[in-house]
Image (tube, rainbow, N blue to C red):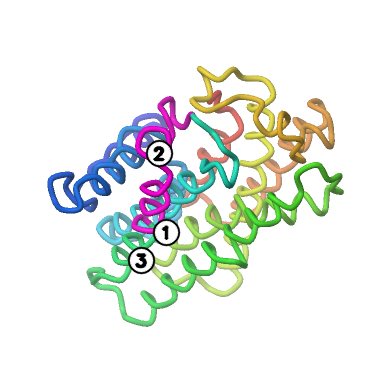
Amino acid sequence: MDFCTWMETMQHRTEENLERRLPSAGIAPQRLHQAMRYVTLGGGKRIRPLLCFAAGDLTAADPVRLDSAAVAVELIHVYSLVHDDLPCMDDDVLRRGKPTCHVEFDEATALLVGDALQSLAFQVLAEALPGADAQRQLEMLRILAQASGSRGMAGGQAIDLAAVGQSLSLTELEFMHIHKTGALIRAAVLLGAHCGEPLSPAALSRLDHFAKTAGLLFQVVDDILDSEADTATLGKTAGKDAAQNKPTYVNLLGITQAKEKAAELRAIAHAALEPFGKSARRLDELTNYIVDRRF
């Protein structure tokens, strides 16, 4: 099928699996479960699950295994957004085109929603995966845990908060985003690949290089969109990073050089996938989508 049809199919599949995995809003504690469903369902591009499924294509992975990995990585992503929007972090009021969790509910509920989504992610990934050996499953849990913690996403957020009002070099900015944004994108690719046939160490290293590059690429494009698109298009507050004096690729490089940086990273990502041939088709297409998306 063509890329757009594939993407819509995988997005719909992810939405159905998230709906199935999340506790019903009618189960106690109802307000917490209602809030979990509010922030998770019916929004977002599902980039991380898409990367997971695309990497699974590369290793001929069982779709049922990929469902669990895709749901787990998306639950971690959504939890991070809920906490990122809190007043003690970025203090935002809009996410995915609707009020943020602490605005729609309250701060305490938002904090618990993030905690609960993170726990659910590991529950999903720890449950039996058809045909997967225990050692492989433990490695997948390790990948997601490391990507989520102080050496990954949480650490990147800490660096981001400390960088407000500071001037960072390009190396420092990339280090921050390798952790804050890139770690979970990298995990999505590796989790998808681990759902299928084992890769050689050299092939796994090439795929990891692609994943790291894709993570930086996503952030560069995000910074460009934040500077050029409006709030209605983005579904979140446009220009928030600039207003808070946060370092971004656009602030550091300027819009023209930021776009050149995105083009450079896209070329590196495509080159990393070349040895995989046609099996990397979806990852190639997703690389282009990350660059050419408009919101």
Sequence-wise, the earlier of marks 2 and 1 is 2
Snapshot quadrant of residue 248: top right
Q: Amino acid at mark 1?
A: Gly
x, y (%) of residue 160? Answer: 69, 50
Q: Is residue 26 left or right of residue 47?
A: left
The disc label shown at residue 192, or none:
1
Question: Which residue is found at the position 82% from the left and 53% from the top?
Answer: 171
Disc number lying in front (3 or 2): 2
Question: Which residue is found at the position 83% from the left and 45% from the top?
Answer: 166
Of 231 and 93, the residue lying toward us: 93
x, y (%) of residue 210? Answer: 61, 54
Q: Amino acid at mark 2?
A: Cys
Q: Residues within 10 Å of mark 1 (few under 14, many from 20)?
A: many
Badge 3 is on which residue?
Answer: 122
Q: Is residue 72 left or right of residue 201?
A: left
From this view, report whether residue 28 is shown above or below residue 13: below
